Amino acid sequence: MASLCSRGMGVRSKTITSMTLPPSPQAIERMMETMRWVFWLEEEQRHLVWMRAKDIDWKIIAWRLACHRTTAWRAWQKALATVAANLNGAADIDVPDCLSEVT
């Protein structure tokens, strides 16, 4: 058995290449719609939402915003609530500002 492995019999060396397919028109439209949502947010909130979308740890986010992790989480929740309120047509909902102590 060792001789089979050492000679490479029955084992094929394949190089796997990843082929990226272009997105469908529907996927592009969904992405564009989602990108429009960030315009409902202030610049700080946009950065925060994108940092979380990139799966950056709360500790790093809190360090970048110069606040506690819980405050950063609350600001993220506020940003999501703002998007949800706009999507539901209730843009005049008063969502408490969590980043006021940061700025």
Image (spheres, helix red, strand yellow):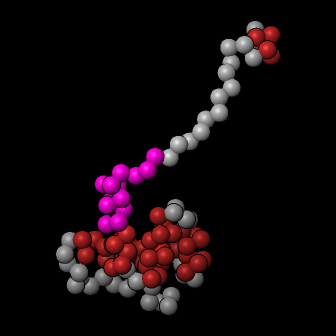
Q: Main secondary structure of the magenta part?
A: helix
In the image, residue 84 lies at what x, y percent? 28, 71
Q: Quadrant of residue 62?
A: bottom right
Q: Quadrant of residue 37?
A: bottom left
Instruction: Please check the rendered image and state whether residue 32 is part of the magenta-colored stretch, yes or no.
Output: yes
Instruction: Please check the rendered image and state whether residue 78 is part of the magenta-colored stretch, yes or no.
Output: no
> In the rendered image of this protein, does residue 85 appear above or below residue 26?
below
**Residue sitting at 31 percent across and 61 percent down?**
29
In the image, residue 73 lies at what x, y percent? 45, 72
Residue 84 can be seen, yes or no: yes
In the rendered view, does 3 fall on the left or right side of 23? right
**Residue sitting at 59 percent across and 39 percent down?**
17
Closer to us: 28 or 63: 28
> In the rendered image of this protein, does residue 58 appear above or below residue 11?
below
> In the rendered image of this protein, does residue 97 appear above or below residue 8?
below
Q: Which range of residues does the magenta coloring cover? A: 21-33
In the rendered view, does 92 fall on the left or right side of 14? left
In the image, residue 80 lies at what x, y percent? 35, 71
Closer to us: 32 or 102: 32
**Residue sitting at 51 percent across and 69 percent down?**
51
Residue 74 can be seen, yes or no: no
